[in-house]
Image (cartoon, grey):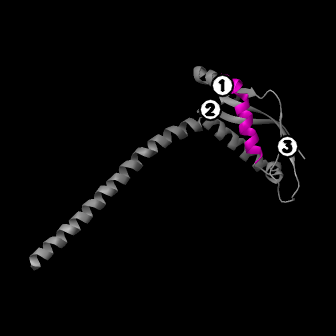
Amino acid sequence: MEKNRLMMSIIIVLLVILIGAVGGVSVFVVKALKPSEEAAVKSAENVKLSIDDIEKVTLSSPISTNLLTGGDGLDHYVKINLSIGVNKMDKKESAKIIESLNANEMVTRDIILNTLRNMTLEELSLPEGQEMLKSALRDRMQQEYESNLIVQVYISDLAFS
């Protein structure tokens, strides 16, 4: 009887060790593969583009919209004109994105309007807020147009009240 208990205890301990080892190996394999994917994405993002490598797509007209009510409780408005920077190193793909941006300007304007309407005057009046806006717009456009070739958003005019 005591031998059976001892054998069962040994078997249970071995099973626990085996399950832990399989889990550990699985985590290691997943982590080992993931950095290579992330490194490829980061290396593409870290490529420093010159201004000549970026095609600017400018909206046909400025956008005016209301901002989110801030701490002062007052209504504020913004008028903004901007351009979208497209990495033109891959000429074929960048031509498709530029054509899509031009053909679907209303989609781009909608992205901009929705983003601005969720910002306050206090946020937008700070340089950090403007950088946050540009990053948010770039990320949202990359998602909408399914392309990382959209690399920058440039604000050419910005006025608020």
Stretch in magenta: 99-117
The answer for how far apart the CA atoms under marks 3 and 2 are is 25 Å
- Residue at image mark 1: 100
* Mark 2 and mark 1 residues within 8 Å of each other at the beta carbon: yes
**Distance between the Cα atoms at labels 1 and 3?**
26 Å
Say the numbered circle drawn on residue 78.
3
- Most extreme residue toward the right, as rendered? 161
Number of residues whose C-alpha sits closer than 10 Å to that of mark 1, classed few (under 14), some (14–19) or many (20 or more): few
Q: Secondary structure at mark 1?
A: helix
Q: Earlier in the sequence, mark 1 or mark 3?
A: 3
Amino acid type, mark 1: Ser
Residue 75 appears at what percent x and percent y?
87, 51
Identity, as a three-letter code, of the amino acid under mark 3: Val
Picture residue at 23% right of the left edge, 63% below the top: 15
| Residue pictured at 61% horizontal, 37% vertical | 143
Is 60 situated above or below 153?
Answer: above
